[in-house]
């Protein structure tokens, strides 16, 4: 990956790679999930609390990695092994693998796939009766013979084992290969020699084999994962006008009859209700959008948008922005750490920061809450049914009472009582004959 970030922590549609197989295992009914980490424990802080961690002291191959988790394996367990950099495996695939394994009472069952181009993958060698004989790795020259390289059936790296058979075979592994590593597939002939059968379950979807070794692979897998996400939403009743230009992370939820227009980017834990409209060129990050809300060409980050709220175009809602039912944040409006009450409007060209605005209030164009005095942030409180005029500045901390008004161009530094008109501006002075005086001086 040429990255300081561990490979399995690179994000794929809003989740780190390692989270994908963990989720698939949980959805498939795994009673315990164990992740094998390196000695630096780089993954430990990024895993769910209910995931166990085993440490592989040195990177000596897949067989050694599984052996690092030996304390978590019981004799009577069905043990499924998958890889953290193969994220497209689905719960259904794991369920089918386990069912095939347990129905056959096999010592081991491997998930295989047939690929047009199997380059780089371990080949599945079958015996004359069609049973799995062994897996031949192809990572280095000399690992496989020519006839073995011609095989198109490959090892996906996903296995189901009888716990007792796996434990016995791990003790017998040796590093007799070009790389001097302990390969997990080498336990298969050992299990067979111990009198247990080796099964193979062919995956109907070959994408489960797609591993990630570089950012080209990551981009290829992301296309597939994103297509799955889009199709799941569309089949659930969401209209995605142009999936090719739309990015939706895996944790995003969207209600029925919502329309997502082209070039939208929905990230993190964003939730969108029913019958909402997400207009073109909108970005939502960890944002909640209510039923029948409309967001047009805007950027929202950790904001709360209530039902029937209108946002944009070209609005910027920052963390802590909370717009209640029927509110509006219009064109070129920025709101941060503020509540805008039900039915209240901030229509255009305003900055609202660290403020609480009541219900049915109208904030006119060019209003600003001056919330920072150079040392600390202060809040502005504006009541219900307030009407401010254009170019009003509120110097916090300040409170404007219910039903109050402000005069255009005012700098409000003192509280405005309920029902009052607050005007704070210099009295206008007109200098007669000023233009003629200037003209004389310039001659």
Image (cartoon, grey):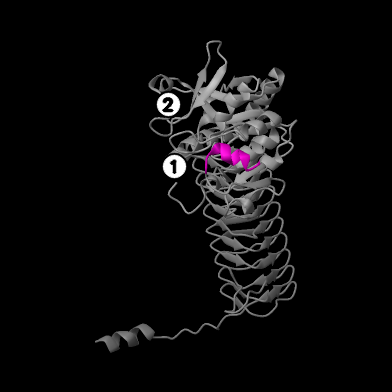
Residue 40, compared with residue 386, is above or below; it is: above
Q: Residue at x 64, y 25 (%)?
A: 108
Residue 242, compared with residue 272, is above or below; it is: above
Comparing 356 with 390, the one in front is: 356
Q: Main secondary structure of the magenta part?
A: helix
Comparing 358 with 423, the one in front is: 358
* Residue 54 visible in rendering: yes
Location of the C terminus (image quadrant): bottom left
Q: Which mark is drawn over residue 214?
A: 1
The answer to whether residue 268 is left or right of residue 222 is right
Q: Residue at x 59, y 55 (%)?
A: 301
Comparing 80 with 295, the one in front is: 80
Q: Which mark is drawn over residue 144?
A: 2
Location of residue 433 (image quadrant): bottom left
The answer to whether residue 257 is left or right of residue 157 is right
Report the magenta residues as a range.
Answer: 60-69
The answer to whether residue 230 is left or right of residue 178 is right
Q: Tag 2's secondary structure? A: loop
């Amino acid at each position: 990956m040429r990255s300081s970030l561990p490979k399995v922590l690179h994000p794929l549609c809003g989740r780190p790679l390692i989270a994908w197989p963990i989720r698939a295992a949980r959805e498939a009914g795994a009673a315990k999930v164990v992740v094998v980490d390196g000695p630096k424990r780089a993954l430990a802080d990024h895993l769910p609390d209910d995931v166990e961690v085993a440490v592989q002291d040195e990177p000596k191959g897949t067989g050694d990695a599984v052996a690092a988790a030996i304390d978590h394996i019981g004799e009577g367990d069905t043990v499924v092994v998958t890889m953290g950099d193969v994220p497209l495996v689905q719960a259904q695939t794991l369920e089918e693998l386990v069912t095939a394994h347990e129905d056959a009472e096999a010592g081991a069952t491997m998930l295989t796939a047939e690929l047009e181009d199997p380059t780089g993958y371990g080949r599945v060698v079958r015996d004359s009766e069609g049973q799995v004989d062994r897996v031949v790795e192809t990572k280095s020259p000399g690992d496989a013979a020519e006839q073995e390289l011609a095989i198109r059936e490959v090892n996906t790296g996903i296995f189901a084992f009888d716990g007792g058979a796996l434990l016995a075979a791990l003790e017998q592994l040796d590093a007799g290969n070009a790389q001097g590593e302990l390969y997990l597939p080498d336990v298969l002939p050992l299990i067979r020699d111990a009198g247990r059968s080796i099964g193979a379950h062919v995956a109907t979807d070959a994408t489960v084999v797609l591993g990630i070794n570089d950012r080209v692979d990551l981009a290829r897998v992301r296309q597939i994962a994103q297509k799955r996400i889009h199709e799941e939403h569309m089949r659930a009743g969401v209209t995605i006008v142009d999936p090719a230009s739309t990015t939706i992370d895996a944790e995003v939820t969207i209600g029925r009859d919502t329309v997502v227009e082209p070039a939208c980017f929905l990230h993190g834990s964003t939730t969108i209700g029913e019958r909402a409209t997400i207009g073109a060129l909108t970005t939502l990050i960890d944002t909640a959008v209510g039923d029948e809300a409309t967001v047009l060409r805007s950027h929202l980050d950790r904001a709360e948008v209530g039902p029937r709220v209108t946002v944009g175009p070209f609005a910027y809602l920052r963390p802590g922005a909370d717009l209640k039912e029927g509110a509006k944040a219009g064109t070129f409006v920025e709101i941060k750490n503020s509540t805008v009450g039900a039915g209240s409007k901030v229509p255009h060209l305003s900055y609202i920061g660290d403020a609480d605005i009541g219900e049915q209030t109208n904030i006119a164009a060019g209003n600003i809450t001056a919330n920072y005095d150079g040392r600390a942030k202060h809040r502005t409180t504006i009541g219900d049914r307030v009407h401010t005029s254009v170019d009003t500045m509120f110097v916090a901390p300040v409170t404007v009472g219910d039903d109050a008004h402000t005069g255009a161009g005012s700098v409000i530094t003192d509280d405005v009582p309920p029902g009052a008109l607050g005007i704070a501006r210099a009295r206008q002075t007109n200098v007669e004959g000023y233009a003629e005086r200037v003209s004389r001086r310039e001659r």
